[in-house]
Structure formats: C-alpha cells, structure tokens
C-alpha cells in the first residue's frame, strides 16, 4: 500500500492570493486524518493539488514514491487512478441505475467509457460492481434509479463507485454535510471500516465537531493557507478546537474588512 507525503506545499494564485503556505504532512496506509478549516482556509486547493487538477507554485506531493507535481498530464493519469474521491453532493448520474453509477468507477481503468456502460461491460466488471454494492449493503437496489434513493443510500452508492476504482488514497470532501445525524454516522462508520480493512490512507474534511472528536485519529487544521495543527486527536480537546475555529472566523472577518 502507498502513503501520501506533502512537502512544503505552496500555492499562489494570480493577484498574489496565497491559498497554501508551506504545508507539510504525511498520511500512512490505514490512517484516517480529519482536515479542518473554514471556507478559504485552503482545504479545496489542497485536495485539487493532491488529485493533480491544480499545480502548486512550489513544494512536492509524493504518492507511491513519485512526486506528482513534476509529471506531465499523461504520466499523471496512472497515479490519479490511485486517489479516490467521495463528495458532499455525491456526484451521481441520477437518471441512471445504481449499478450503472458504480460501473462508472471503472472509467480510469477502461480503454473507453463505452466499456463501463452496463450492456457492454465485461462479466468481470459486472461482478466487481455487484461486489462493491454488496460491501455497502445496497446490492438489492442495483436496478433502482439513483434519484429514488435516500441521501444516505446515495452516498453509499458513491462509496461503492469509489471502491470500483481500487484507490489507495481516499479524499472525502464533507461526505456527511448533507445527511441527517443518523445517516451521517452510518456513512462514517462504513467509510472508516472500508479504509481500515483495505489499508487505505484517507483525508476527510469535516465540520461537525462531535463527528470530528468521535471519528478523527489525527487532526490537520488550515488557517489562511497555513497548517496550524497536525496532532493526534488524543492530544487535543474540544475547547481548543472550538477556539481554533473562533480564531479562523476572526481572521476571515479581518480579511473582509481589509
């Protein structure tokens, strides 16, 4: 299994807006990291750099002993397949079946998109898609349209699609923000079970502090592009984390005044 190492990562946008400022950390296989920070703190830019959709100004991102910041687009594609995404808004094709949505997870491993459409997919891919649905407890809903599922079920389909990709690193961008508390905990339980059983490295953006304290192993926090926390959850308490958010909120207000 592979790890993720971010070294001295800096991203400056036109107009001298510094989205990331000398950020360094490592995530090992089987480790779950929670990423905290208000809007504008640099979380989304960090994710885009790790997936290769954004080129940093300086620094490196090492995946599978390869610095992806130095790769061309073609050479980046095989590495990008190793990074799976779980989104807040699920990113499903809602007018298609659950089964078809999961098959789309094989796009990066198929010669053409044609081979991921259910009528033309190989028996091997079809069996794998059903196994992924079985793992998230939705095999019985394979033929149902995605828009006829609950929010929690839709996120489970998104996780099954991610499993279809065979990733080794998972980036989860507020995966339970649009779910009720019960469904949110069910999704977090499922996601972390899968991460641990497969030895995946995961970074999960969360805003619900109760969930952070319950599920976080290590906390990384960004404020105005700088990494201000990189600690095991055992070394942090609720009061400190709440004060951190208060400081970030104050910084955001100061920016608007300026």
Image: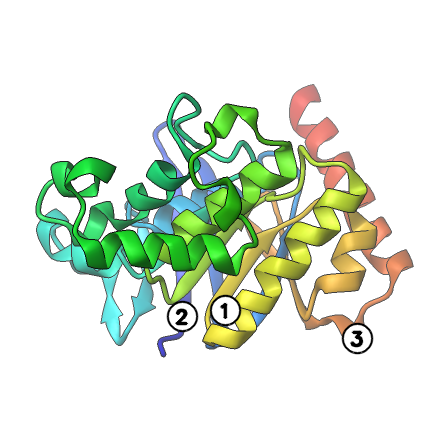
The residue singled out by tag 2 in the image is 5
133 left or right of 234? left
Q: In the rendered image, which quarter is residue 59 located in?
A: bottom left
**Alpha-carbon span between mark 3 and mark 2:** 22 Å
**Element type at mark 2:** strand
**Alpha-carbon span between mark 1 and mark 2:** 6 Å
Percent x, y for residue 55?
28, 46
| Quadrant for the C terminus in the image | top right
Is the C-beta separation of discs 1 and 2 under 8 Å?
Answer: yes
**Alpha-carbon span between mark 3 and mark 1:** 17 Å
Is the C-beta separation of discs 3 and 1 under 8 Å?
Answer: no
Q: Nearer the viewer, residue 220 or 146?
A: 146
**Looking at the image, which residue is at 52% across and 75% down?**
197
Percent x, y for residue 256?
67, 22
Residue 218 against residue 57 in the figure, above or below: below
The residue singled out by tag 3 in the image is 235
| Quadrant for the N terminus in the image | bottom left
The residue singled out by tag 1 in the image is 25
**Element type at mark 3:** helix
**Looking at the image, which residue is at 32% across and 49% down?**
56
If you read the primary sequence from the N terminus, does the residue marked by circle 3 or circle 1 appear first? 1
Percent x, y for residue 25?
50, 69
């Amino acid at each position: 299994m592979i790890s993720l190492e971010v070294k001295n990562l800096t991203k400056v946008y036109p107009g001298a807006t510094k989205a990331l400022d000398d950020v360094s950390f490592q995530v090992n296989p089987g480790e779950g990291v929670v990423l905290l920070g208000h809007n504008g703190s640099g979380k989304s830019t960090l994710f885009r750099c790790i997936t290769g959709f954004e080129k940093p100004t300086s620094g490196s991102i090492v995946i599978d002993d390869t610095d992806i910041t130095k790769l061309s687009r073609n050479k980046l594609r095989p590495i990008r397949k190793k990074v799976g995404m779980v989104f807040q808004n699920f990113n499903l094709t809602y007018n298609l079946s659950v089964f078809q949505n999961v098959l789309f997870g094989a796009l990066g491993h198929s010669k053409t998109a044609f081979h991921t459409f259910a009528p033309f997919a190989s028996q091997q891919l079809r069996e794998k898609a059903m196994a992924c649905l079985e793992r998230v407890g939705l095999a019985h809903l394979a033929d149902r349209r995605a828009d006829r599922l609950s929010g929690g079920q839709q996120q489970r389909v998104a996780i099954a699609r991610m499993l279809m990709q065979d990733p080794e690193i998972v980036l989860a961008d507020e995966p339970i923000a649009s779910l009720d508390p019960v469904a949110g905990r069910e999704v977090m339980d499922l996601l972390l079970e899968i991460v641990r059983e497969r030895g995946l490295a995961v970074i999960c953006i969360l805003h619900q502090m109760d969930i952070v304290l319950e599920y976080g192993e290590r906390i990384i926090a960004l404020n105005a592009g700088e990494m201000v926390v990189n600690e095991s959850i055992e070394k942090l308490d609720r009061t400190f984390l709440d004060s951190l958010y208060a400081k970030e909120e104050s910084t955001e207000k100061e920016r608007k005044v300026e």
